[in-house]
Amino acid sequence: MSSIDTLDLNGTYSYADYLKWQFKERLELIKGKIFKMSPAPATKHQKIAGMLFAEIWHLLRNKDCQVFAAPFDVRLPRFDLKSDKEILTVVQPDISVICDPRKIDEKGCIGAPDWIIEILPPGNTRKEMNDKFEVYEESGVKEYWLVEPNDEVVLVYVLRDEKYTGLRPYTVGQALTSVTLPDYTVELSQLFDKK
């Protein structure tokens, strides 16, 4: 298949279907439903993603945890169902930190990363704040950051007793330290630097 228009957008699909598609558009599957990804990210988005990735990569050199940037498939199976036909959620987080090397294979990650960072594109916040929030929580992603470039705020959620607890919003002038990697702190004034 070469055109997304040939699909029933109300249908339910699996990772096995996803692997067959050869579309120009990038897609994600959330609970079997197709979500089109935003067009190429804006420069501001790329600068933020690049800075976070570079700093985290540098911190993790020669350590067990690894960091990956999109496009990178994160397959989130329900329970222990791991065949391609049984996996109904495949996402491409902006940044994924994975500390269990058994979760990494040639296709990407199978299972919940320890930490996911999503940079919100304009007009696509519902998917990140509702749909992905829910699957990340259900899958056991321990730490989830939502970076909002326009408002210059970072929302942080930490998994406690299988439910996300929201920390206070972090804004310019504050420093934010990862719960997953306590050696990593980012100054938000630097993160949102307009240069």
Image: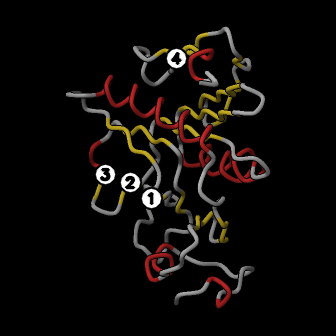
Report x, y in % for residue 159: 59, 31
Q: Are marks 3 and 4 in contact (CB under 8 Å)?
A: no
Q: Label 3, label 1: how many angstroms apart (C-alpha)? A: 10 Å
Q: Earlier in the sequence, mark 3 or mark 1?
A: 1
Label 3 to label 4: alpha-carbon separation: 26 Å
Label disc, if present, on residue 186 of the rendered structure = 4
Left-right relation of 166 to 53: right
Q: CA distance from mark 2 to mark 1?
A: 6 Å
- Residue 12: image quadrant is bottom right
Marked residue nearer the N-terminal end (3 or 4):
3
Q: Which residue corresponds to the image point at 40% horizontal and 25% vertical from the top-left?
A: 55
Q: Confirm or deny contact between disc 2 and disc 1 (CB under 8 A).
A: yes
Locate residue 183, reporting x and y percent.
Answer: 40, 14
Q: Is residue 169 above or below residue 82?
A: above
Tag 3: residue type? Ile
- Asked whether the residues under the numbered discs 3 and 2 touch, taking CB atoms below 8 Å apart as contact, a structural biologist would say yes
Task: Identify the residue under disc 1.
Answer: 73
Colour style of the rendered protein structure: secondary structure
Find disc 3 in the rendering and name its residue.
Answer: 104
Label 4, label 2: how far apart the Cα atoms are: 25 Å
- Residue annotated with mark 2: 109
Q: Amino acid at mark 1?
A: Asp
The quarter of the image holding the C terminus is: top right
Q: Residue at x 40, y 56 (%)?
A: 110
State the CA–CA distance, disc 1 to disc 4: 26 Å
Q: Are marks 4 and 2 in contact (CB under 8 Å)?
A: no
Q: Residue at x 28, y 57 (%)?
A: 105
User: Of the residues tagged 1 and 4, which is closer to the observer?
Assistant: 4
* Identity of the residue drawn at 62% across and 14% down: 189
Furthest-front residue in this view:
195
Displayed quadrant of residue 47: top right
